[in-house]
Image: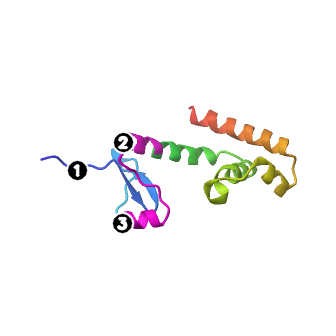
Amino acid sequence: MSKFNPLSVIVNGELVTIDKGITTYTHAEIVSYEGLLESGIDCADDSDSVEEIVSLSIMKEKLQLAMQSLTNDERTLINALYYSNGGEGVSERSYANSVGIPRTTIEYRKNVAIDKLKQILQK
């Protein structure tokens, strides 16, 4: 008889890795698959392997930690360009117009922030 040992679960809309004691929760909300779909949570399908799901979860966690090392202005810029507008982000031109800064300056600042993130994530 095999023992069921999940590598990750979705808790309150976040994929949480339980393997190797990284994170554990004693109380968790039980949700249905339909509830996850209605809330817009991405769910694994048959083409996703467990390794891919866990790897993606770890990368997201590392990115969230790396984002904390950016300045408030850099974090605001990255969030606007990549995560605002329902996850589609906004264009550099649109963001530049909204904050009154030249688009080339926005592009430069974006590249600086991305370079910082790359350096942190490569460690």
**Quarter of image, res 109:** top right
Q: Tell me: 77 left or right of 64.
A: right
Q: Position of residue 112 (x, y in %)?
A: 74, 38
Residue 12 can be seen in this image: no
- Circle 3 packing at 10 Å, graded few (<14), some (14-19), many (20+), is few
Work out whether mark 2 precedes mark 1 in sequence or the reverse, and give the earlier one. 1
Three-letter code, disc 2: Ser
Q: Is residue 26 above or below residue 73?
A: below
Return the mark for residue 69.
none
Q: What's the magenta region?
A: 27-56
The residue that label 1 is drawn on is 4
The residue that label 3 is drawn on is 32
Q: CA distance from mark 2 to mark 3?
A: 21 Å
**Quarter of image, res 20:** top left
The stretch drawn in magenta includes residue 18? no
Secondary structure under badge 2? loop
Three-letter code, disc 1: Phe
Q: Position of residue 43 (x, y in %)?
A: 42, 54
Q: CA distance from mark 2 to mark 1?
A: 17 Å
The residue that label 2 is drawn on is 49
Work out whether mark 2 precedes mark 3 in sequence or the reverse, and give the earlier one. 3
